[in-house]
Image (cartoon, helix red, strand yellow):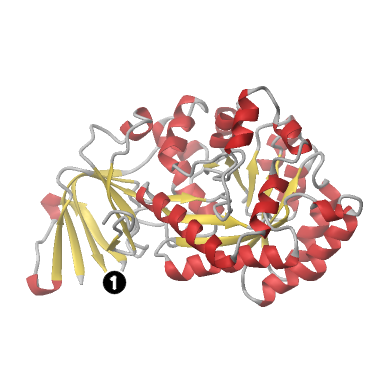
Amino acid sequence: MKKIIKNISEIIQVENTASKFISAKEMKNINTIKDAYLEIDEGKIVSFGSMNDWKGITNWNETEIIDAEGGMIFPTYCDSHTHLVFSHSREKEFIDKINGLSYQEIAKKGGGILNSVEKLRNTSEEELYKISLKRLNNLIQLGTGAIEIKSGYGLDLESELKMLRVIKRLKKESKATIKSTLLSAHAVPKEFQKDKQGYIKLIVEKILPQAVEEKLIDFIDVFCEKGYFTVKEMKYILKTAEKYNIKAKTHVNQFNSIGGVKACVELNAISVDHLETMEKEDYNALLDTSCMPTILPGCSFFLNMNYGPARKMIDKGIPIALASDFNPGSSPSGNMNFIMSLGCIKLKMSPEEVINSVTINSAYAMGVEKMLGSICIGKKANFFITKPISSYGYIAYNFGENVIDKVFLEGEYIKNPDHK
């Protein structure tokens, strides 16, 4: 059935022609339409514009009228970097951080990634699916309509495939657009602590081929960082994935700049993520490329560490995306409204730059820019209606309030399944 949304105070992020991504220079601009309508048919956007230009309804029997009641419409967020599939929270480590331990110190005492690995290996696939679906449904209600989800808490063949099969099931069961990333190179598991090359061999000879054979992955990722995987090791893994036509999205420059950015650009990675530590050569490597730098301010907030230099990057002519990095250890929130607030408050970005970074640019960073990221004819009708607010900057300004009233995915109103 066709749907008409009326009484929209303003539609945010409208495009007449879909953009690949928004350049650094143009990130300060967004297009909007005030006093607007939006028309949806068969899950896609078919028309929008000013209420003054609305031609009315020709067939009342096949049209549903939805009153926005003066709210704004935004395209749903595209969260291009998450670890949503995990088994248990890690608030004990949160207390360790409060008591002064660093991320690296917590890892050395048995916390960190390997803590999540142990818990996930002992969780059934069915239970993992149920808790992951609940998290996903909660994020949808907070405005996320597309999400990338990584493996990386299994670190053996059975457990990595278990995670990826859960993600595949989420793809089938949810209206959200989901992309799956193999992150077996997240850390070296305990059983391979004295045989790192043996673990890398397991990834490239067993885990990756099996994931490809079962059509479980869209991307591959490597945590390229001191104490984890070197640039040389990352290049080997990514080049192997390239033989299967699997593109890369990578963790680089979280704590150290060791050459990962340049290597990823040369290997045609779709994005490089984290970037809290940047050197001159890293900026230069990203100029005039098709690789989307993605900053994860929720991680910096939670770990109380440096924020990625978003302002400097944009001013140098480098576009960026923002994502949540939702995970149990370093960013236990997938709330993209809060990420927008951090973008403005901590990264010194304007509301327009932030909106571009969590919609069109983040859609590009997960390869869905042709169908999502803006209000554009022919794209999926993935959007949310806000409660009446004074401006589109209000979401980032009032970081403690949820102003989202209704969420639509593929034109369908998504009710919160936890609300009876």
Does residue 222 appear to the left or right of 359 in the view shown? Answer: right
- Comparing 197 with 67, the one in front is 197
- Say which element carries label 1: loop
Frontmost residue, 96 versus 288: 96
Where in the figure is residue 164, as x and y percent of width and height?
A: 61, 65
Depth order, front residue of 355/298: 298
Which residue occupies the foreground of this view, 363 or 192? 192
Please say if 387 is above or below 271: above
229, above or below 237, in the image: above
Residue on which disc 1 sits: 42
203 lies left or right of 52: right
Taking the image as shown, residue 222 lies to the left or right of residue 23, namely right
User: For the point 9% across and 62% down, which residue is it?
Assistant: 56
Task: Say which quadrant the N terminus sits in.
Answer: bottom left
- Examine the rendered structure and indicate whether residue 412 appears above or below residue 31: below
Label 1 CA crowd tier, 10 Å (few <14, some 14–19, many 20+): some
- Say what amino acid the circle numbered 1 marks: Glu
Q: Is residue 144 left or right of residue 184?
A: left
Regarding residue 315, the answer to whether it shows in the image is: no
Q: Residue at x 50, y 49 (%)?
A: 362
- Report the residue at 50% width, 36% height from top: 25
Provide residue 313's location: percent of width, then percent of height.
Answer: 60, 33
Snapshot quadrant of residue 275: top right
Whether residue 127 is visible, yes or no, is yes
| Residue at far top of view | 100
Whether 291 is drawn above or below 253: the answer is below
Where is the C terminus found, in terms of image quarters? bottom left
Residue 80 in the image: state x and y as whole percent. Answer: 53, 51
| Residue drawn at x 72%, y 71% as measured from the top left | 244
